[in-house]
Image: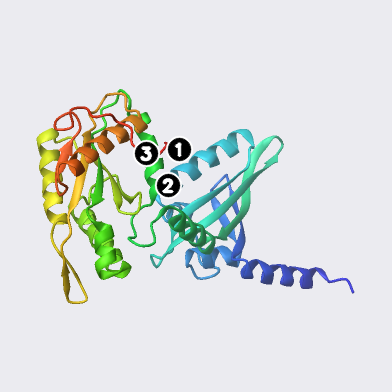
Amino acid sequence: MPLSDAEARRLYDQAALMACIGAWECRLADTQLSWTDGIYDLFGLARGSAIHRSSIVDLYHDESRAEMERLRKRLIASGQGFVMDARIRTTAGAERWMRLSASVTHEHGRPVRIHGAKQDITGEKDMWMGLRRLAYSDPLTGLANRRAFEMQLSDLRRHTGDACALGALAIIDLDNLKPINDRFGHAAGDECLRQIAMRLETSFSDAAIIARIGGDEFGLLLCSAAGRPYLLHRLEQAQQALARPVTWRDTSIAVSASIGATILRPGLLHDPERRFAEADSALYVAKAAGRNCLRLFGEATGDVAMARSGVPRAS
């Protein structure tokens, strides 16, 4: 049987609340807002309470607020509707994501009100961010993975001719992981990798990225305007920290790491593959020198041939 208008409205309102969506309208003459219950819930306000545009806009994060205001002005000027995802905080301080859609109504050729829908999409955003973390992180160490490192490395192309404080690209190789696995088991080897990862994070908390790029290899992109001596000092300190024994099941396991690095000078053309190959060749020299040491490209390497297998390709 057909529904009455009241019944249809009741069912619609129930469905809208279940979908965490609400309708809104703003009268342009005086910016007076009208909301359905779903939007009050979204912002954490009591249903039916007084609302003022200026105080509601303050609940948007700065970047979302700026984008929303830009699109709003375009909508009023051109009639071009929009849909955007915005970060907001409720009146209680809870962080949420909201999908905002907007259109404009004209009377006698003049825009008189804008209106649309707002939907809580926090769960959707959390799901996609979780999937992204899985796609770009190493499950063993929690660091970024090879794919994320390649993407970050490809950004070096953008630093041509600017004053970005690029510092160093380094490759760190855990020495003798296979003997550790053979003697103590793979669980011990995994713990060594985790400890090396944590020490790298401690030593380079300001790094652009720290990633596990292979079984026992880590990649590091460091930004600093302090110059070559400072960067060398930090790499040396990290190399010493990586050489501390790892405790596993009351057993002290001797570990060490070899580091190959190349200095990234600001304002120069940076080819990601070439810079990686420079650090890789420096690592090759460090391993050949007896392991547990640091080498910079162009100093102790003698500009050894720069291509070994496994150089990542920039995405």
Residue type at mark 1 is Ser
Q: Amino acid at mark 2?
A: Arg
Q: Quick check: 105 left or right of 150?
A: right
Picture coordinates of residue 214 (x, y %)? Answer: 35, 50
Circle 1 residue: 315
Say what secondary structure mark 3 lies in: loop
Q: Specify few, some or many for label 1: CA neighbours under 10 Å numbering under 14, 14-19, or 20 or more.
A: few
State yes or no: discs 2 and 1 in contact (Cβ < 8 Å): yes
Under mark 3, the amino acid is Ser
In the image, residue 31 above or below residue 263: below
Nearer-N-terminus badge (3/2) = 2
- Is residue 5 toward the left or the right of residue 198 in the image? right
Q: Nearer the viewer, residue 30 or 139?
A: 139
How far from the left and from the top, in percent, is residue 134?
45, 58
Residue 227 shows in the view: no
On the picture, is 250 further left or further right than 102? Answer: left
- Is 92 situated above or below 77? below
